[in-house]
Image: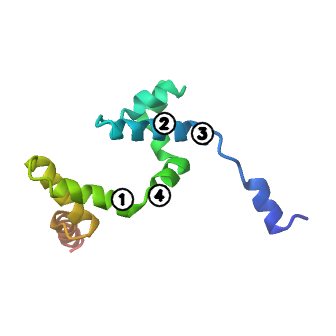
Amino acid sequence: MNTKAEEQLKAFKPRKNGERVKRVFERSVENIKNGDKPNISGSMRLEGYSESSCRALKAQQTATWKELLDAIPENVLVAELFSLATDPDDKRTKLEALKECFRLKDKYPASKMKLGAFQEQASEFIE
C-alpha cells in the first residue's frame, strides 16, 4: 500500500520541453530589447517545434512560459510602461500606454462597461 506522498511522487512528471520553451522566451525578450516584434512562431521553428505547434503558439501555453513571465518583476514593467506614457513625442504610443496603465490599475471603464452590458443582456434573456 502506497502512502499519499508516494502516489504524488509517482504522478509527478518532469517537464520535457522546459529548456526549449526557455530558449524561445529568451529569444523573444531579445527581439523586444532590440525594438523588434517578437516572432514567437519563428523562434519555435528554430527550436524544432512542429508546424502545427508553431501556428498555435503552444510554447506560450506551457507552465514554463507562465513561470518565466511571472519571474519578470512587475515594478519594472510598470516603470517601462509609465516611461512610454510620459513620452511627449509619440502620441499613439502614449495613448496605448496610458490605456494599459489604467487596465493594470483596473480603472479602465471599457471592460467594465462590456461586462455590465453582458450582464444586462443575460438578465433580459432570463426574464
Residue 103 drawn at (x, y percent)? 24, 63
Q: Which residue is mark 1?
A: 76
Q: Residue furthest right?
A: 1
**Disc 3 versus disc 2: distance between alpha carbons?**
9 Å
**7 up-or-down from 48: above or below:** below
- Which image quarter is the C terminus in? bottom left
**Do callouts 1 and 4 mark residues in contact (Cβ within 8 Å)?**
no
| Residue at the spot of label 4 | 70
Using the image as rendered, state which of residue 5 and residue 93 is in the foreground.
93
Q: Amino acid at mark 2?
A: Val
Q: Position of residue 89 (x, y in %)?
A: 9, 47
Label 1 and label 4: CA atoms lie apart by 12 Å
x%, y% of residue 81? Answer: 25, 56
Label 2, label 1: how far apart the Cα atoms are:
21 Å
- Asked if residue 108 shows in the view, the reply is yes
Rounded to the nearest angstrom, the CA distance separating label 3 from label 1 is: 25 Å
Mark 4: few/some/many CA within 10 Å (<14, 14-19, 20+)? few
Judged left or right of residue 16, residue 33 is left
- Label 1 environment density (alpha carbons within 10 Å; few <14, some 14–19, many ≥20): few
Callout 1 amino acid: Val
First along the sequence among labels 2 and 1? 2
Pointer 3 residue: 19
Q: Is residue 73 left or right of residue 62?
A: left
